Image (tube, grey):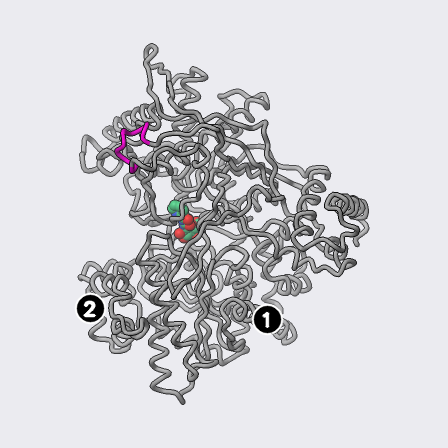
Amino acid sequence: MSISHTNEMALFDNNVQKYCRFFELASPQQFTLEQWYQVIARTVLEMAYHKPQGKVDEQRHINYLSMEFLIGRLTGNNLMNLGYYEDIKAYLAQYQVELVDVLEQERDPALGNGGLGRLAACFLDSMATLGQAATGYGLHYQYGLFKQAFQDGKQVESGDEWGRNQYPWHRYNPSKTQQVHFGGKVVAIEGDRYEWQPKLTIEGKAFDLPIVGYQNDVIQPLRLWQADSPQSFDLNQFNEGKFVAAEKTLIKSTALTQVLYPNDNHRVGQQLRLMQQYFHCACSVADILSRHLAQGFSLEEFPKRQVIQLNDTHPTLAIPELMRILLDEHQLTWQQAWSICQQSFAYTNHTLLPEALEQWDQRLFKQLLPRHFKIVEKINHLFHQQVKAQFGDDAKVWEKLAILFDYRVRMANLCVVSCFAVNGVAQIHSDLLVSQLFPEYHQLFPTKFCNVTNGITPRRWIQQANPALSQLLDQTVKGDWKKDLELLHQVENVVDDVNFREAYWHIKQQNKAALAREIEQTLSLSVNPDAIFDVQIKRFHEYKRQHLNLLNIIATYQWLKDNPNKDYTPRLFVFSGKAAPGYYLAKNIIHAINNVAEIINNDKQMKDKLQVAFLPDYRVSLAEKIIPAADISEQISMAGKEASGTGNMKLALNGALTLGTLDGANVEIAEMVGQEHIFLFGHTVESIQTLLAEGYSPKTYYRNDPVLKNAVDFLAKGKASKGDKTTFNLMLDSLLEHDPFLVFADFESYRQAQERIGQAYLDRDAWLRSAILNTARLGKFSSDRSIRDYQSRIWLKK
Ligand code: T68
């Protein structure tokens, strides 16, 4: 036990004994692991607030609004950041309890879909660590992202009741309760003053989670809003039955925050989702304003003291909501209110995919939020004047720039018009944002646009996920690399040191052995720990092209069957990821991977050569087990489609070599690690344009490439579906008829890259150097750097 924590550990012990009496146990020896988890979390939460709080920079308070925060397990993370990890580990040892076993008891709060929600969690960690004053605002869903299981190879979903009522890390904060209104009508009072007479009121209750900075005693809240009110409401009262099936309309108010919508990179058009969005914004804006005013500042000072950062367009309604409060409740003029809003909001875009850009039906919007609609109409009208002044009265231009168009409310346009900054999440994405999505906006507001490349927190993604590597880095690097990830550059100095290389290799092998045990436990599949662990872990989406990976696996299987005695570097292909429940094509790909895995894994000839493990129910805690064990990181999206990716950073930092297209942050990873230490393949954004201009025909590739044809036919002829030739039609028809994400066009190049990987792995020393240099050169991708970029380019820009 370290000297400095003696008092705190005495307090800890005191609490443990108290809980012991509380549970009517003779000794803590009798605690179950679950009880240990609860006792540790509750006690440490109190200890954290006992400490004098660390200093934060309050120049401008960052209000990070996100519908999703994928925080992962908090106990281990908080123990490390607070510096209690080793003390508590030692404390438990006296009862023969392993801390790691206790930590396994914690259920992941799955309050997000994927990258966007996880990014929000990394950013909160970094803001606390850097002492940037910040509050996260989200929703306290009762059901997180669905749990995934496989039945006959198909994804089946079940509700993730994650136990928010037993969750030890948050506190209900009744003093922050808010009232949120919906529907009704707007009456004109005088001039352009209006009064909103709403029809329904729902209460928003606050639940606060502590975000703990890394060893600086800073704790900031993640405030999650939960809808609560004894009242039920009729969904149809807003829309005369036009949007919702009649029989399902009477729902409890609590239903508002019951479920996280399970779509990523796809918009949802449902009324309940719009209500969730407004509920989130109304609670958060009211809370931000009351904190600001309680500190004694005026409304005019709001932009100087506050930033409201919008994580994608999901919290856009915060803009008309702040306008409404300033106009109707504080009687500011339009110019005053608009000026405050324009200087306070900033917007981060996470996608260029047209199907993901949010648009709301105007009638639905108006019926649910009549006052906000009026405000948006006026913003739209005034903006139209500005557009005419710049471009003349050009209908074509207005069609692109309008906020209200064709009976729709376009949220991204509302954001670009209203915010003082708009950023993309990797350089290539930010460039495409300007050149493809918003060129006219860029002409109008050239200084609004900037790039902030995403990042990941090294505290979770090395220190916690890969303790052995973390220790090796501690021994090798001077200074605390967890605070300054660029310090990892020092590792370049030891890449020639045989002892270091062997230590690094040994750690990777240990991590692979651990993952092999996990696979054995979950899938009853015994895998070759010496194979290349080739990993693709992420949401299932056509643009991410898990089916490109699958077609190569089938082609490899066929080649190995034909050439049983030829050399082949053994591979284990690991998949994990969920598909949105209504995304049938993505689910079809999951089904195909599982069925092909079944065939290959049961083929004795493939033993220890080619294996496929699809781990169900991908989540943060599973990612923490897979990532440290990976040799190859599959980042194979069609160029121009993946905004950034963050899994690519986590894997490379842990010494996996990237097999990737020039897309998203892969481009910057390649720049940092150097072309010799990454496997790039496939069409680029530019060559895709040429290909499409010439007329792309996937069938031509299918006819001309026998390897591709055989792989496709394997599925088409029912060889992975007990002879049924229709099972994978959804996927195959799409590929053969349109192939919108150019799987066939990149197949050959992907095969060649896989071939290069097989060769490269044989030279263990060269491989190891590459892996080490990946770790050494990934410092840029710390989310601490991202937050500093937000500070210098957006929040505190001079
Ligand atoms: C991801 N987006 C990007 N969206 O796809 C990824 N969408 O490239 C990027 O690295 C990451 O954001 C962080 O910037 C998402 O994860 C969603 O999850 C989502 C959720 C709801 C609606 C739409």
- Queried whether the magenta region covers residue 335, the answer comes back as no
In the rendered structure, which amino acid carries the disc numbered 2?
Answer: Lys
* Residue farthest along the top direction in this orientation: 190
Question: Helix, strand, or loop for circle 1?
Answer: loop
Viewed as shown, does residue 694 lie left or right of 551? Answer: left
Q: Nearer the viewer, mark 2 or mark 1?
A: 2
Which residue: 24% across, 61% down?
734
Give whichever of discs 2 and 1 has the lower sequence position.
Answer: 1
Q: Nearer the viewer, residue 711 or 795?
A: 711
Residues drawn in magenta: 236-245
Are the residues flagged by discs 2 and 1 in contact, CB closer than 8 Å?
no
Q: Is residue 547 above or below residue 558?
A: above
Residue 699, numbered circle: 2
Magenta segment's dominant SS is loop
Estimate the x, y position of residue 342 in percent, counting from the top left: 41, 29
Most foreground residue, 522 or 340: 522
Q: Is residue 499 above or below residue 785?
A: below
Q: CA distance from mark 2 to mark 1?
A: 47 Å
Q: Which residue is mark 1?
A: 495
Q: Residue 139 in the image: x percent, y percent?
A: 48, 38
Q: State left or right for residue 790 relative to residue 477.
A: left
Residue 606 in sight here: yes
Q: Amino acid at mark 1?
A: Val
Residue at position x 54%, y 36% from top?
A: 223
User: Residue 354: x percent and y percent?
Assistant: 29, 47
